[in-house]
Image: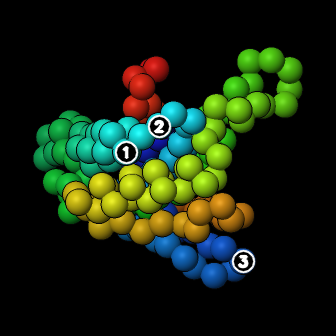
């Protein structure tokens, strides 16, 4: 399972022109589910994302988490995080879990993250428009298999 975590001052998702999810000061999480992932991958990444110290303390050092900031999260399903673009020009998505396996693990991640902070989401397997203001910019890559 892979995630891109961004520190944001605001983020929102619209589907067909309708607002479906938003977050103010907090994190925007793009989540990709790989074939072979389990609920333990979801639990690991949720805990890691919630506790990342990417918010500044009174001294300007990144020592605070979104939990400390009493912020929230906006989570977006993003199978393209599993893309393999090493060959040719068309990425392969063969490492991504099929939707019927990915959706329950995506929902598990959201559930685990809700154990730490308020969470809103997009709509799984739809065309979404994501708007956000990345503070810093701060963007962190996470992988449950610790590939990076």
Height in image: 139 above or below 72? above
Residue 74 appears in which quarter of the rendering? bottom left
Mark 1 and mark 2: Cα distance apart in space: 7 Å
Residue position for label 2: 37
Q: CA distance from mark 3 to mark 1?
A: 31 Å
Q: Secondary structure at mark 2?
A: loop
The image quarter containing residue 144 is top left
Q: Where is residue 94 drawn, in percent x and y?
A: 71, 32
- Residue 79 is situated, as x and y percent measured from the top left of the image, at 63, 45
Label 1 close to label 2 by CB (< 8 Å): no
Residue located beneath label 3 in the image: 16
Q: How much space separates mark 2 and mark 3, taking CA atoms?
A: 30 Å
Within 10 Å of the Cα at label 1, are there few (<14), some (14-19), or many (20+) other Cα atoms? some
User: Where residue 56 sits: x, y (%)?
Assistant: 23, 44
Please say whether residue 147 is visible from this viewpoint: yes
The residue that mark 1 highlights is 39
Q: Give the left or right position of residue 52, taking residue 97 as reference.
A: left
Looking at the image, the residue that sits furthest to the bottom is 18
Indicate the secondary structure of the residue bearing disc 1: helix
Residues 121 and 41: in front is 41
Of badges 3 and 1, the one in the foreground is 1
Which quarter of the figure is the C terminus placed in?
top left
Callout 3 secondary element: loop
Residue 24 is left or right of residue 104, and the answer is left
136 or 105: nearer the viewer: 105
């Amino acid at each position: 399972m892979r995630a891109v975590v961004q520190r944001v001052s605001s983020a929102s998702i619209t589907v067909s022109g309708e607002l479906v999810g938003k977050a103010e000061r907090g994190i925007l999480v793009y989540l990709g589910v790989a074939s072979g992932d389990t609920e333990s991958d979801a639990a690991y990444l949720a805990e890691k994302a919630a506790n990342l110290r990417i918010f500044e303390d009174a001294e300007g050092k990144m020592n605070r988490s979104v939990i400390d900031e009493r912020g929230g999260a906006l989570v977006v399903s993003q199978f393209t995080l599993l893309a393999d673009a090493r060959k040719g020009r068309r990425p392969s998505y063969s490492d991504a879990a099929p939707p019927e396996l990915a959706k329950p693990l995506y929902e598990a991640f959201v559930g685990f993250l809700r154990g730490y902070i308020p969470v809103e989401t997009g709509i799984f397997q739809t065309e979404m428009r994501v708007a956000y203001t990345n503070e810093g910019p701060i963007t962190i890559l996470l992988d449950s298999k610790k590939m990076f």
